[in-house]
């Protein structure tokens, strides 16, 4: 990003445009333009807003937007990727070597469901046994009852 900032700064100076003038024309704060020219990306919370500022500034200065966008994307890739750009270029030359970013790598994890099924079956069996014990405890003892009038049972 420092190289891109220097390009913007030298182009602005060669065009004879002051930082304040560019700031007023673009409606971008002078401090933000200074941070862009110095390559200080930490001053920007949103990298996409920074990209918009850089492209707008480059367009204002008459630079090729596609080249500036490519340079910014290279910076962004180098900043955010865990693999180096040089490794990717080598990958194109050597097809046998596999390089994958941790952000795009597909993880295939085999899940063994046998323990889960055994656990569920075990819980069901234990529940059935507990229910049978509770029902067995609540059964009355064997007694002989007789039905008397009014639907009342009497122990004989």
Image (cartoon, helix red, strand yellow):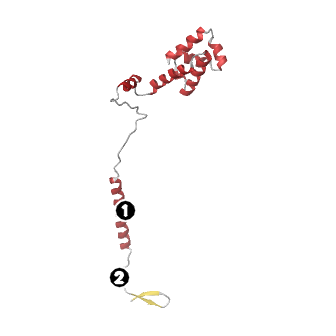
Q: CA distance from mark 2 to mark 1?
A: 30 Å
Q: Work out whether 146 lies above or below 79.
A: below
Residue nearest the viewer, comparing 89 with 136: 89
The quarter of the displayed image where residue 30 is located: top right
Q: Which of the pair 153/84 is nearer the observer?
A: 84
User: 45 left or right of 83?
Assistant: right
Q: Nearer the viewer, residue 44 or 139?
A: 44
Can residue 46 be seen from the camera position used here?
no
Give the crowd class for mark 2: few <14, some 14-19, many >=20 residues within 10 Å: few
Residue under the image location 64 percent in, 15 percent down: 22
Which image quadrant is residue 129 in? bottom left
Dividing the picture into quarters, in which one does residue 37 lie?
A: top right
User: Does residue 143 sit above or below 1 in this rendering?
Assistant: below
Q: Tell me if mark 1 has few (under 14), some (14-19) or many (20+) residues whose alpha carbon lies within 10 angstroms of its own.
A: few
Label number found at residue 48: none
Residue denoted by label 2: 142
Kindly identify which residue carries mark 1.
124
Instruction: State the image coordinates of residue 131 (x, y, percent, origin top left).
Output: 38, 68
Helix, strand or loop at label 1? It is helix
Label located before the other in sequence (2 or 1): 1
Q: Nearer the viewer, residue 138 or 111?
A: 111
Q: Residue at x 65, y 19 (%)?
A: 26
Q: Count the numbered circles shown.
A: 2
């Amino acid at each position: 990003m420092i190289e891109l900032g220097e390009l913007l700064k030298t182009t602005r100076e060669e065009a004879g445009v002051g930082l304040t003038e560019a700031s007023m024309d673009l409606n971008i704060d002078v401090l933000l333009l200074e941070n862009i020219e110095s390559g200080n990306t930490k001053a920007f919370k949103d990298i996409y807003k920074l990209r918009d500022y850089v492209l707008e500034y480059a367009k204002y200065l008459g630079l090729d937007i596609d080249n500036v966008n490519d340079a910014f994307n290279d910076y962004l890739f180098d900043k955010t990727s865990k693999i180096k750009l040089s490794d990717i270029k080598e990958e194109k030359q050597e097809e046998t070597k596999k390089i994958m970013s941790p952000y795009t790598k597909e993880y295939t994890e085999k899940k063994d469901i046998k323990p889960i099924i055994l656990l569920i079956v075990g819980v069901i069996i234990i529940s059935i046994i507990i229910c049978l014990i509770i029902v067995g405890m609540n059964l009355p003892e064997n007694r002989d009852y007789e039905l008397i009038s009014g639907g009342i049972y009497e122990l004989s």
